[in-house]
Amino acid sequence: MKTTRFILLIAVSLLFSCLPKKPDISGTEVPAGPLVQAVDRQRLSVAALKALATVEVDRRGRKRVFDSVGIVIDARRRLRIEVFGPLGQSELALVWDGSELLLRLPDDDRIVRPGQAGIERMLGIGIEVQDLCAVLSGTVMAIARPLDARAYCTQDAACVLELPDGDMVRRVRVLPGPVTEPHDIRIAGMEAYRSDNLVYRARYEGMQELSRVLLPRTIVLENPERGMRVTIEYADVDVNTPISEDAFALAGSEAGAP
């Protein structure tokens, strides 16, 4: 019996040792305050976003492309993602109204309340809805504990800002911004870890300036350990324009969880 328990203990230890761990950060530690302020300025610069995008979902090499996806974000408090068909008809819609997630199923007018599973059903990645709003805005989450932030920079001024938040740690990759004001930095992406294990990684590519706001043309959201990657290509974007309250409501019949 003791031998069996010993073998089980060794097996469990080896299993957990194989899990992907949070990598060390290269560079020299520097005062985090200026970077925290710069990152937060960029976060606050995107109060609202309305966009039409192409979305490619890659699940372990099996790809599916959605050519017309509407994305509406209200200051990271509310979100709507809607997939349209070739004739402009709504095929799938997910709405977060600030308190709960609503999902309208394809080929049906039923509305369900799937919770966090609704995002995983659409994207295949277990990202929290507030994080998803930040990623789609090309920015970061609200900084919960700025005094606990740590920053590390290399000689070429590329920096990583580490932000603890409960059992989560987010790492924001920051590069020098364009020479023109008001962009003193550029947020290049973000990673989130829970208990040292990667939850998601986001990359912001092809930056464009809209209404004095830096926004990526392409966003790559992935979890390589799960073989998941979602690529969002913005085709038409409006930043900080008024958004109707109707954008965060769904019409249809109520149903149970999917």
Image (spheres, rainbow, N blue to C red):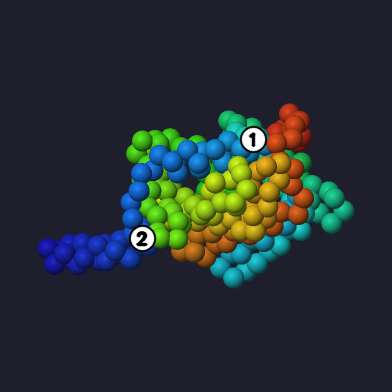
Foreground of the two, 18 or 133: 133
Q: Earlier in the sequence, mark 2 or mark 1?
A: 2
Q: Is residue 256 visible?
A: no
Measuring from the top left, give residue 25's x and y in whole percent: 36, 58
Decide: is 252 above or below 15: above
Q: Which residue is mark 1?
A: 47
Outermost top residue? 245
Image location (x, y in percent) of residue 47 = 64, 35
Quadrant where the image shows the C terminus: top right
Count of residue discs:
2
Q: Which mark is residue 112?
A: none
Asked if residue 244 lies left or right of residue 256, the reply is: right
Q: Nearer the viewer, residue 95 or 177?
A: 177
The residue that appears at 58% across and 36% down in the rendered structure is: 44
Q: Quadrant of the N terminus?
A: bottom left
Question: Would you say the residues marked 2 and 1 are in contact, meaning their CB atoms lie under 8 Å apart?
Answer: no
Measured along the vertical axis of the image, is residue 190 above or below residue 33? below
SS at mark 1 in the image? loop
Residue 14: x and y, percent? 27, 66
Determine which residue is flagged by label 2.
26
Q: Is residue 101 left or right of residue 19?
A: right
Residue type of the residue flagged with mark 2: Ser
Inter-mark Cα distance, 2 to 1: 33 Å
Which residue is found at the position 71% from the left and 62% from the top? 65
Amino acid carrying label 1: it is Ala
What residue do we see at 74% from left, 47% from top? 237
| Apparent side of residue 70 relative to residue 117 in the rendered image (left or right) | right
How many residues crowd around disc 1 within 10 Å: few (fewer than 14), some, or many (20 or more)?
A: some
